[in-house]
Image (tube, rainbow, N blue to C red):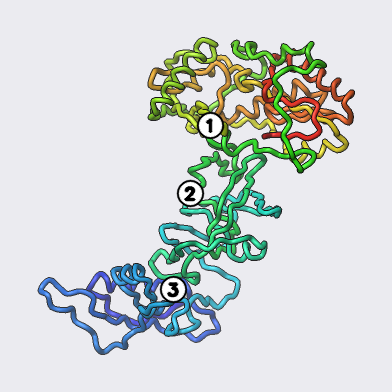
Amino acid sequence: MFELAPLKLPEHLDHLVDFCIAMDDQIRTGHSRDRPRRLLPPLPLVPRHTNTSGTPEPVRTDLPVVEPMQIGRTGISEAERTYRRERGLCFYCAGAGHFRLQCPQRPRGGRGDTGKPGQRTPTSQVIGSLYASFVDNEKKKTRILVPISLTWEGVHLKTEAFLDSGASGNFMDRVFASKNLMPLVLKERPLMVEAIDGKPLSCPHITHDTIEVCMKTGVLHQETIRFQIIDSPSCPVVLGFPWLTEHNPVIDWVQRDIKCWGPSCQLKCMGRATVIGSLNIATAPPLSTVVPDCYQALKEVFSKARTEVLPPHRPYDCAIELLPGTMPPRGHVYPLSQKENDIMEEYIKENLERGFIRRSSSPAGAGFFFVSKKEGDLRPCIDYRGLNRITIRNAYPIPLITELFDRLKGARIYTKLDLRGAYNLIRVKKGHEWKTAFNTRSGHYEYLVMPFGLCNAPAVFQDLINDTLRDFLQTFVIVYLDDILIYSPDKETHHTHVQQVLRRLLKAGLYCKLEKCLFDIEMVHFLG
């Protein structure tokens, strides 16, 4: 229970706001029970404005004058706060050459002492133009914490990241960075840190960023990222709104987990290379242009023409089951450059001829756009985010990379196979084609083959390829989606293994992209 001195409410709005902030600070910070209770100091009125007649507002001279910026009492006006911020003046005494935290006139103690060590009051921070929100450790159950791994300069570190749509940047806790010897870079200009009511916090500004680090989220999602250093003891890493909009993850709020990633991540962030064998790479093995002699009898499995024909319906057709009572949204037409428009027209023409798409009268319609491939080319993408949000997830598991690589012990020779047009080798389940509809400038179309961007596409394809090679798995083959790695202890055995796999793929109507395959090598980049 707090005691407040009886006081007539101020007549002017600015004074009333200051008084309310002071009362709120007093109530939120509180006092420990073993301390003597004290009264909130009387509210002084100081000249701030002139009234409409041009005469100054009256000043109460019977009250003590407060110090410039003592927390728990009246604060400076917003205009004065802006003036001091622009000129780098102290928020406490208005002096130059130091911040409020180092102000020689500022009384020590008092602020922030709740009387109970180890407890933190939920705090909101405005960091320059950045905003971040933090809560007590007791509220971890209300947050989305995802496991991440960070790599820099040969150091590997696992931790958790808080997904915070209220944060306007990506942050790392100062103590966490120091403890793990994270290299930091001094900012050219520090960012001021203020509370949401404009008052400085214990850390007055952000002065450092981390170096660029490699962050891995989940199994294959990998990126290069920098963090800004702040005080955040309850959350070592915070991924804010810009990160969420860039990667657009689909989040299961019940399981508190990321289920799939946005379309752009399929090209930019997924499937980065993992090195198997020697790390000392002098020259990369040349890509294949001719089928090796020992596999010539099976060269049909490398046929490009076979992949340009509409595949038959199979038990593995991609079904798109929607949540009850939902309907796929109709998206807008994305603006395209002249170059993109020309590529789109060619894409539509080719896929109509192959029978992969057809004209549609579906009420659904996702947007069509392009993303850049690492070679510099453009890849067409469909914005299925709206459809994915209402799609029932296929629970078929995707392999864990670490478990796959554990099986390679004793292997000395490898062959890597890359499937051509992998997703297009699977049909959309009959009657579900209308849900894949997309809009372009030239018309409305829908897919007959499984397109990229559907949240269940990886699970559907993994089911197909696992069943195709099931008796080889765990023995001499590992498979991750459309990447196949065959491994053997010696060359003679290896040729037999590769021939067995090629025969099985050909029988299943799955074909390899010869220019991306590597045969009979002692070192390979897998998932690259």
At a point 51% along the width and 34% down the height, the residue shown is: 389
Give me the disc on residue 27: 3
Amino acid type at circle 1 is Gly
- Nearer-the-camera pick, 520 or 157: 520
* Sequence-earlier tag: 3 or 2: 3
Q: Which residue is mark 2?
A: 241
| Left or right, 261 with reference to 287 | left
Q: Do callouts 1 and 3 mark residues in contact (Cβ within 8 Å)?
A: no
Q: In the rendered image, which quarter is residue 289 located in? A: top right
Q: Residues within 10 Å of mark 2 (few under 14, many from 20)?
A: some
The answer to whether the residue labelled 1 contacts the one labelled 2, judged by CB atoms less than 8 Å apart, is no
Report, in whole angstroms, how far the alpha carbon at label 1 lies from the one at label 2. Answer: 28 Å
Q: Closer to the observer: label 3 or label 2?
A: 2
Under tag 1, what secondary structure?
loop
Q: Determine which residue is flagged by label 1.
A: 376
- The three-letter amino acid code for the residue at tag 3 is Ile
